[in-house]
Image (cartoon, grey):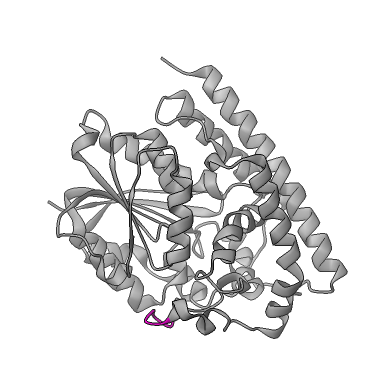
C-alpha cells in the first residue's frame, strides 16, 4: 500500500532542508565576499543555468520522497541530531570560515600531516581535503564535515546518499536480513549507515574508515539504534574475509583517491563480495555525464583541495569495474552524483 502521507512528509522535509541550507550557503558566500576570498575561475566547459540545477535537484528530492511512498525506506530523521547540536556545528563552521579561506588562499594543505594521527597513514589521505584544518583526521573536522558538505550542496548530500537505499531494498527483497551483511567503505561520519540501519534494522552492518575521529563520530550517530561494527582500516586492504559481504557501498570516496589506489580498492571490494553480491557506488558526476555541466566539474578542484578529482572525472570506471568482475546492473544520475550498481559475477 502506497504511503502517500509519508511521501508528502518527506517531500516537505526535503524542501525545508533545501531552503535552510540555501540560506546558509548564501551567508557563507556573502562572508567570502566580505573577506575578499572568492575564487575567480572561468571554466572552459559549459555551466548549467540556475533553473537547470534546481530542476535536477527537484527531481532528486521527489525521487527520495517516492522511495518513502513505495515503502522502500523510512523518512529521513536528520541523522538524529538535536537542533541545538546542529546550530552549534553551524556556529563552529562560520567561526572556522576565515581561517579556512586563508588556507585556501595560501594553498596550505599540510595541517593534517602535522597531527600525530597521521602517523602510518598514506600520504594521499593525510592532507587537508576541502582546506579543512586537520583534513579528515581531527575531531574538529569530524564535527564540521556534514554541515560543510550540506551547505555546499544545498542540503542534498544526504539525499544523494539515500539513492543507494532503493537499490539495497531491491537486493534484499524477500531475503532474511539477519543472515545478510553490508559493508560501507570509507563510512566517514556514519550518516549513511544510520539511514541504512533505520531502513533495514536486522541487517549486519560494518563501516570501515581510515580516520579514528570520523569513526568516533559515526558511532555517536548510531546511538539509540542497533550498533554497527566500525573498523579503522585502509580500503586497500579490507580486514574482512573473502566472499563475506552481500552488499558493499562506497559513497563519495573515489574522487579522493589516486587512480592506482582506486584500482586496488575496487579489487578489495570484489574480493569481499559474495558471488552475486551487489556494489552500490555513488560519487561525483564525471565529464560528459551531463555535458552542459562540465564547467562545474572543472571549477570544483579549483575552489576546493581535491588533488585527484581531475583524474577521477575522466577515469573509465566501467573498465575498472568490469576488470574486477563487477558486471553492470544500472547507471543513473542523481543531481550532482553518479549512481552505479554492479554485481559480482558468480
| Location of residue 203 (image quadrant) | top left
Q: Is 267 on the left-hand or right-hand side of 61?
A: left
Q: Tell whether 175 sits left or right of 82.
A: left
Residue at position x 21%, y 31% in the image: 175
Q: Is residue 124 visible?
A: no
For the point 61% across and 68% down, the residue is 300
Pinpoint residue 277: horizontal percent, then vertical percent: 21, 48
**In the depicted view, which residue is nearer to us: 103 or 251?**
103
Query: Residue 236's spot in the image, x, y percent?
Result: 29, 71
Q: How many marks?
A: 0
Outermost residue, right side: 34
Percent across and percent down for residue 338 are: 46, 54
- Quarter of the image with the N terminus is top left
Q: Residue at x 78, y 54 (%)?
A: 26
Give, as a single range, the part of the protein colored magenta.
Answer: 119-123
Q: Quadrant of residue 179?
A: top left
Question: Which sits in the foreground, 78 or 5?
Answer: 78
Nearer to me, 144 or 306: 144
Q: Vertical placement of 6 versus 77: above or below?
A: above
Q: Is residue 194 above or below residue 209?
A: above
Residue drawn at (23%, 64%) of the image: 239
Is 280 rendered above or below residue 140? above
Residue 159 in view, yes or no: yes
Q: Is residue 304 above or below residue 227?
A: below
Q: Nearer the viewer, residue 250 or 310?
A: 250
Asked if the magenta segment contains residue 122, the reply would be yes
61 to the left or right of 192: right
For residue 209, what is the image quadrant? Answer: bottom left
Is 138 within the magenta? no
Q: Position of residue 71 (x, y in %)?
A: 41, 25
Magenta span: predominant SS is: loop
Amino acid at each position: 500500500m502506497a504511503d502517500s502521507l509519508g511521501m508528502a512528509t518527506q517531500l516537505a522535509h526535503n524542501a525545508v532542508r533545501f531552503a535552510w541550507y540555501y540560506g546558509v550557503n548564501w551567508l557563507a558566500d556573502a562572508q567570502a565576499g566580505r573577506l575578499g576570498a572568492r575564487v575567480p575561475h572561468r571554466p572552459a566547459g559549459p555551466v548549467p543555468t540556475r533553473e537547470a540545477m534546481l530542476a535536477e535537484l527537484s527531481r532528486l528530492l521527489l525521487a527520495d520522497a517516492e522511495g518513502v511512498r513505495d515503502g522502500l525506506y523510512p523518512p529521513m530523521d536528520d541523522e538524529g541530531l538535536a537542533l541545538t547540536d546542529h546550530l552549534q556545528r553551524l556556529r563552529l563552521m562560520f567561526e572556522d570560515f576565515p581561517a579556512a579561506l586563508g588556507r585556501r588562499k595560501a594553498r596550505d594543505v599540510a595541517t593534517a600531516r602535522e597531527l600525530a594521527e597521521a602517523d602510518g597513514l598514506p600520504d594521499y589521505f593525510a592532507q587537508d581535503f576541502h582546506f579543512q584544518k586537520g583534513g579528515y583526521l581531527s575531531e574538529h573536522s569530524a564535527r564540521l564535515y556534514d554541515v560543510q558538505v550540506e551547505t555546499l550542496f544545498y542540503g542534498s548530500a544526504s539525499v544523494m546518499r539515500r539513492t543507494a537505499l532503493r537499490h539495497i531494498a531491491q537486493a534484499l527483497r524477500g531475503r532474511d536480513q539477519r543472515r545478510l551483511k553490508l559493508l560501507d567503505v570509507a563510512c566517514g561520519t556514519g550518516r549513511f549507515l544510520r539511514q541504512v540501519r533505520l531502513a533495514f534494522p536486522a541487517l549486519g552492518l560494518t563501516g570501515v574508515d581510515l580516520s579514528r575521529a570520523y569513526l568516533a563520530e559515526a558511532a555517536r550517530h548510531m546511538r539509540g539504534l542497533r550498533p554497527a561494527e566500525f573498523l579503522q582500516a585502509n580500503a586497500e586492504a579490507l580486514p574482512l574475509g573473502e566472499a563475506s559481504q552481500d552488499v558493499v557501498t562506497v559513497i563519495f570516496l573515489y574522487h579522493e583517491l589516486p587512480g592506482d589506489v582506486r584500482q586496488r580498492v575496487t579489487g578489495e571490494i570484489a574480493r569481499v563480495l559474495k558471488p552475486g553480491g551487489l556494489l552500490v557506488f555513488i560519487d561525483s558526476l564525471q565529464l560528459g555525464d551531463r555535458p552542459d555541466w562540465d564547467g562545474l566539474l572543472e571549477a570544483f578542484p579549483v575552489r576546493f583541495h581535491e588533488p585527484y578529482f581531475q583524474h577521477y572525472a575522466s577515469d573509465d570506471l566501467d573498465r575498472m569495474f568490469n576488470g574486477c568482475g563487477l558486471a553492470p546492473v544500472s547507471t543513473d544520475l542523481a543531481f550532482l552524483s553518479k549512481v552505479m550498481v554492479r554485481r559480482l559475477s558468480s
